Amino acid sequence: MELFYELSHQQLVQWLADCGEPRYRADQIFEWVYHHGAADFAKMTTLPSPLQQALAARFELDWPHIVKSTGQPTTKYLLEYPDKVQVECVSIPMGTYYTFCLSSQVGCAMGCLFCASALGSFERNLTAGEIVGQQLAVQRVIHRPRNIVFMGVGEPLANLDNVVAAIRRFTDPHTLDLSPGHITVSTAGIVPGIRRLADMNLGVELAVSLNAVTDSQRQQLMPGAARWSIAELLTACRYFTRRTGGQPVTFEYVLMADVNDSLEQADHLAELVGDLRHHVNIIPFNAVGHQRQRALQQGDAGRCSLWSTSGGCG
């Protein structure tokens, strides 16, 4: 069976046409799924029974499943897909509305020393429908989001086609109808991906995990992203801003004691990004264990048995 969330509105219109059904049925079905959170075609009471049965025979609606959730009011959800792989996503209350933090991959191959997502091995990319499914699974528990950030597990720009397809679904008037400006794509700094995203000009926000002011330290902290120099990364960010009509980039900087928090490094950071007039988001370093903290301080990732989180969603 096919995961229903893989379908765009136009693809559903075509499938219905092949079944001899009118176009307006697609609007009804998307209303049930994306606005009412329906996870059972039989409960779509505005549809004729034969169509309900045809949909149920072809499409799966109730994946992914929430295995568990932890924390309040910010809540982390562990989700499982039919092939038994699991990912995490987070709902974050922001006053009267919610931000959903979504994952783009199962595991992560970037190997950032400070990030808990690097604990497990990379397994596979998530499809667009699987990404959308995260949002719908959480939406059934709380409310529809106002913002979506790709800051969960995985590197979004290493799965760019599926991430973009999910973004198009989130901004579709038939689904969430989110403004692109309410969606943020966060990257460890995949330079070709930044340029591709810039050329698409989707209107989404871009956040770049920087965390170091020299190439040597970035190689130590972020080996997967450091194949591109900081100079190359900043050039790509300037390109993104230019191609998107002046849209700023947010630089994320995880502050680690005795690693990247000196006044000299702060001055260097200001010199690097000052001319860009972009934002710098200082993120607390949340150590999982003292061994990881000591390894960071001594610059020895191989001696570390415990991982830590950068303070992001994943």
Image (cartoon, rainbow, N blue to C red):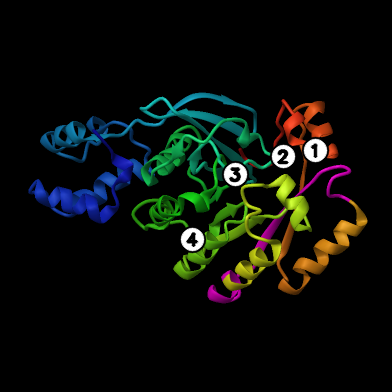
Residue drawn at (49%, 63%) of the image: 197
Residue drawn at (28%, 31%) of the image: 40
Q: In which quarter of the image is the N terminus?
A: top left
- Which is more toward the observer, 105 or 32? 105
Q: Is mark 1 on a helix, strand or loop?
A: helix
Q: Which one is in front in this view, the residue at disc 4 or the one at disc 1?
A: 1
Extreme residue toward the right, this view = 263
- Which is more toward the observer, 185 or 238? 238
Which residue is denoted by mark 2 in the rendering? 114
Which residue is denoted by mark 4 in the rendering? 179
Query: Going from the N terminus, do you reach mark 1 or mark 2 first?
Result: 2
Q: Is residue 211 visible?
A: no
Q: How far apart are marks 4 and 2 (CA)?
A: 32 Å
Q: Is residue 231 left or right of residue 154?
A: right
- Which is more toward the observer, 59 or 290? 290
Q: Which one is in front in this view, the residue at disc 1 or the one at disc 2?
A: 1
Which amino acid type is shown beneath numbered disc 1? Leu
Which amino acid type is shown beneath numbered disc 4? Ser
Q: Are marks 1 and 3 in contact (CB under 8 Å)?
A: no
From the top left corner, tell me how far across and down residue 249 is, in percent. 64, 64
Q: Give the range drawn in magenta.
A: 240-261
Q: Is mark 4 on a helix, strand or loop?
A: loop
Which amino acid type is shown beneath numbered disc 2? Phe
Q: Do the residues labelled 3 and 2 touch (CB within 8 Å)?
A: no
Q: Is mark 2 on a helix, strand or loop?
A: loop
Which residue is denoted by mark 3 in the rendering? 110
